[in-house]
Amino acid sequence: MRVAMISEHASPLAVLGGEDAGGQNTHVADLSVALAAAGHDVRVYTRRDDPDLPVLVPMRDGVTVVHVPAGPPEQVPKDDLLPYMKEFSRWLAAQWQGDEWRPEVVHAHFWMSGLAAIAAGRQTGVPVVQTYHALGTVKRRHQGANDTSPARRVGYERALGRAVDRVIAQSQDEVRELVRMGVPRSRMTVVPSGVNETFSPAGPSAPRAGRARVLTVGRLVERKGFADVIQAMALVPEAECLVVGGPPADELDTDPYAVRLRELAASAGVADRVRLVGAVPREDMPYWYRSADLLVAAPWYEPFGLTPLEAMACGVPVIGTAVGGLTDTIVDGQTGDLVPPRDPAALGAAIRALLDDRVRRFGYATAALDRARQRYSWKRAADQLDGIYAAVAGVRRPSGVVA
């Protein structure tokens, strides 16, 4: 089947770690590869953000990235991309009407991709499925006045949920949120993200200096909870904490949030035990996971969260905040521990207790590895989507309207 992936701001070719480059990029890249391995012909459409990018870039056998000329060919924050979605959709429709390559199903990633996809799909008769990756209601609830999303985001997301042929939710928490928004439960199927097979317990690991090691990973943005982890380390004497992610190591000294985290570590008296590593190539991440006694994922909110799964697939137990998709992936008391968000004291107590209990850590690690392998493979996700794509390709397009 010919499958068009629409990922307007998150290219599968992007270097991870920037403000708008993270889990969605990885999800789209790995899912596309898995679908191609299952026999699908996949094209990923993403916005051209550099004038030197060619229109077509082969990513691997069966996967081609298409750079869509919509808006200026330069980096633009994703929250500023809405005005260019009409141009994006018109370009898609023109290509699909005139090109020899015409998709049989469109899979949109993020709400703005959904707007472009459904407009182009209606003009060309191609069915559309939607994965949100994040919801405006959740972002607004947690960020309040700091939410930079376009004002009509929530309304667009609600309308998309009613207009597309199928909504692909990533967790039960997302299903509940969508139902509260007014999207019918009958329109949804839960297909969680997978974890790449390169993440495994076998292989080399980063060197250690004898201390117990706590690892925390992600883009250096406030909602990821790195400040809470650093404060928690004051309750975990002798252990070290490595923060992996953000800009390259040689740019950390000038990154405002990295500077704030280092200042916080100094004020908490843990500067000698907290190290910011900076950006790490994705293919090197197993090397860092394997070096850790445990991973801490402490976001204030998280639609899904790939880093806990990656750690679990490397045989590392996880302590996470009880938010979003983490409540699906981490089984409290079996594969790791869940704690309340934005609570450094509870986080510190959980870290210390788990580091002090080698037997429990071993049990968690074994169960975490088994869960990641059995429940969260990309092959499993591709198999589930294969059935959904086949079903919607034979169903008449919905008649709902997205303004």
Image (cartoon, grey):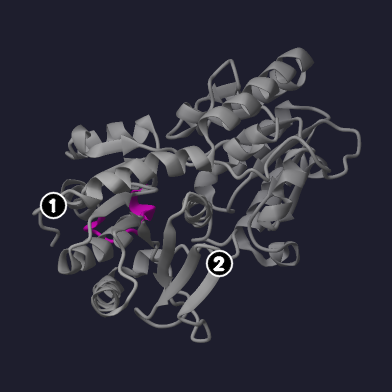
* Residue drawn at the location 43% of the way across and 61% of the way down: 42
Q: How many marks?
A: 2
> Is residue 11 at least partly visible in the picture?
yes
Quick check: 143 above or below 93? above
Quick check: 274 above or below 367? below
Question: Residue at label 1?
Answer: 396
Q: Quadrant of residue 367?
A: top right
* 70 to the left or right of 12: left
> Is residue 344 at least partly visible in the picture?
no
Across and down, in percent, residue 134 comes to 38, 47
Front residue (pair 214, 196): 196
* 366 to the left or right of 333: right
Mark 1 is surrounded, within 10 Å at the Cα level, by few (under 14), some (14 to 19) or many (20 or more) other residues, namely few
Mark 2 is surrounded, within 10 Å at the Cα level, by few (under 14), some (14 to 19) or many (20 or more) other residues, namely some
- Asked whether 150 falls inside the magenta stretch, the response is yes
* Residue drawn at the location 46% of the way across and 51% of the way down: 35
Q: Tell me the chief SS of the magenta region.
A: loop
* Residue drawn at the location 55% of the way across and 63% of the way down: 61
Quarter in which the N terminus is drawn: bottom left
Secondary element under disc 1, as helix, strand or loop, is loop
- Asked whether 300 falls inside the magenta stretch, the response is no
Q: Please report the bounds of the magenta region as a residue range.
A: 144-153
Question: Residue at label 2?
Answer: 59
